[in-house]
Amino acid sequence: MILSQKNIEEIAVAVIRDFQKSFFGSEADDPTRFALPTPIDQFASDYLNLKVSFQKLSSDGSIYGLTAYVDTEYQIEVDGSQRSIFLKTNDVVLDKSFIEPENIRKLCGKRRFTLAHECAHQILFQLDADDRKIACHKRTEVRENGSRVLRTQEDWNEWQANALGAAILMPQSEVDRAMWFINSRKPLTCYGWHFYDKDQVKIDTFCSVFGVSRSAAAIRLEQLGYLNRKKDYEYRDPLEVWP
């Protein structure tokens, strides 16, 4: 199943609307409310009935998470030795580094996005055609560090899970609300990946609201028209004095 960004946004809208009604109740329909960030842990466990656990998945931290559609076994290599992780239907395993005391705050955004990514795999699997489901049954979905060129079906699966995961964590309707309060719905500006002056405070406020990293926030805001991206060299410090 190959979906467009528009298809993915439509799936996210339907899923989040249903979840918000069950989780937030009447608050979800209040037109004067502030943005409601998606409580991704409850979304995974209460809405999708996923069982989330934590294990060391690699020696170098390159594997962030796994999920399975049926009972299966996944082979990993940790500290030079091979071992098996046994996954039951609807299990999600995240890397243990996410819950180490020194990382809980530092890696919060990455953990939330990884869990949203695995939730997205499960949602997309349920929407897939029956023949594709059979082909995918024994496959374990793995979220690794790094980007991919979209050449294979697996590449598309990962892109779609990233796109849907972002739309679940940062639903367009909630981004609209947040940006109204943060910047009167005007776009922020970044130079390369850097924010300056007031926009630096505003992107950090956005990240705090949605519990995401700056990079995830910037990609989503640009996608929704709330970010103007310029080249690094285009930035001019307003306090800089030219001779």
Image (cartoon, rainbow, N blue to C red):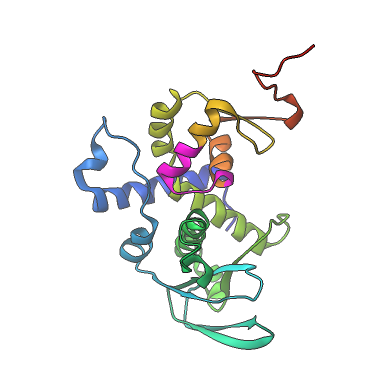
Q: How many numbered circles are shown?
A: 0
Q: Nearer the viewer, residue 119 or 199?
A: 199
Q: Quadrant of the N terminus?
A: bottom right
Residue shown at the point (43%, 22%) measured from the top left: 184
Magenta-span inclusion, residue 52? no
- The answer to whether residue 99 of the structure is visible from this angle is yes
Q: Quadrant of residue 31?
A: top left
Q: Quadrant of residue 219?
A: top right
61 to 193, vertically: above or below? below
230 to 164, vertically: above or below? above
- The answer to whether 73 appears left or right of 23 in the picture is right
Residue shown at the point (35%, 38%) measured from the top left: 35
Residue that extends furthest to the left in the rendered view of this protein? 26
Residue shown at the point (60%, 59%) measured from the top left: 158
101 to 57, vertically: above or below? above
Task: Give the x, y percent position of residue 39.
Answer: 36, 54
Task: Give the x, y percent position of residue 9.
Answer: 48, 44
Task: Give the x, y percent position of residue 91.
Answer: 44, 74
- The answer to whether 215 appears left or right of 111 in the picture is right
233 to 128, vertically: above or below? above
Residue shown at the point (48%, 69%) measured from the top left: 100
Task: Give the x, y percent position of residue 106.
Answer: 51, 56
- The answer to whether 157 appears left or right of 186 in the picture is right
Q: Quadrant of the C terminus?
A: top right
- The answer to whether 235 appears left or right of 175 in the picture is right
- The answer to whether residue 66 of the structure is visible from this angle is no
Residue that extends furthest to the top in the rendered view of this protein? 243
Q: Nearer the viewer, residue 211 or 25?
A: 211
Instruction: Give the magenta range.
Output: 204-215
